[in-house]
Amino acid sequence: MRDAQITLPWADGDYTFRLGWGELELLQEACGAGPYVVLNRLIADEWMMGDVLHTIRLGLIGGGMAPTDALKKVRDYVEKRPPVENVLYAQGILSAGLTGAPEEGALGEDVAGNQDSSSTTSQTES
């Protein structure tokens, strides 16, 4: 199962981030743009302040952190720091939310890997 969870060394420790469907909808609302538009802005260095802040905050919440704790973390480690320090983190969190974390493997990989390839008869052969 691809749950888009990613753990990163960020701020004062290692944190789990996850942008599920609900968090992506909240991100879209907070940033006034769809998630891929936000990701493209982050990658193209055309981001807005909220793109970075809300991606990290919502990622922390989706990763299991209480909303009040997530807000405190972004106030301490995003708002009080130069914005560029967190752009790559936001890119990684949002990329994982949209496409899955790198270590998750491709959708259908388990099924394809477990197929019996010992048969020499074509499925269309009679």
Image: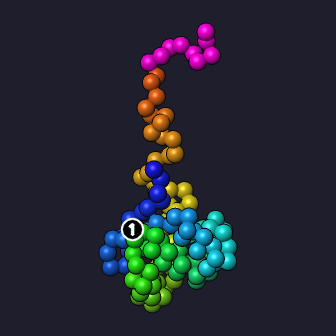
Residue 21 placement (x, y as % from top left)? 56, 64
- Magenta-colored stretch includes residue 30: no
Q: Does residue 66 lie above or below 72 as drawn?
A: above
Which residue shows up at 43% across the image and 74% down it?
60
Provide the residue designation for mark 1. 16
Residue under the point 66% across and 69% down: 34
**Which residue occupies the foreground of this view, 2 or 13?**
2
Name which residue type carries label 1: Thr
Residue 64 found in image quarter:
bottom left
- Residue 17 position, x and y percent, is 43, 68
**Magenta extent:** 118-126
Q: Residue furthest top?
A: 126
**Residue 67 placed where, x, y %?**
44, 80
Q: Is residue 97 visible?
A: yes
Quadrant showing the C terminus: top right
Residue 30 image offset from top left, x and y in percent: 61, 79
Identity of the residue drawn at 45% across and 24% down? 116
Q: Main secondary structure of the magenta part?
A: loop
In the image, 118 versus 77, the foreground residue is 118
Relative side of 71 to 12, left or right: right
Q: Compared with residue 124, is residue 38 higher up or lower down, i.e. above or below?
A: below
Q: Secondary structure at mark 1?
A: strand
Residue 89 appears in view: no
* Neighbours of disc 1 within 10 Å: few (<14), some (14-19), many (20+): some
Q: Nearer the viewer, residue 75 or 41?
A: 75
Relative height, residue 69 to residue 106 (above, below): below
Q: Residue furthest left?
A: 13
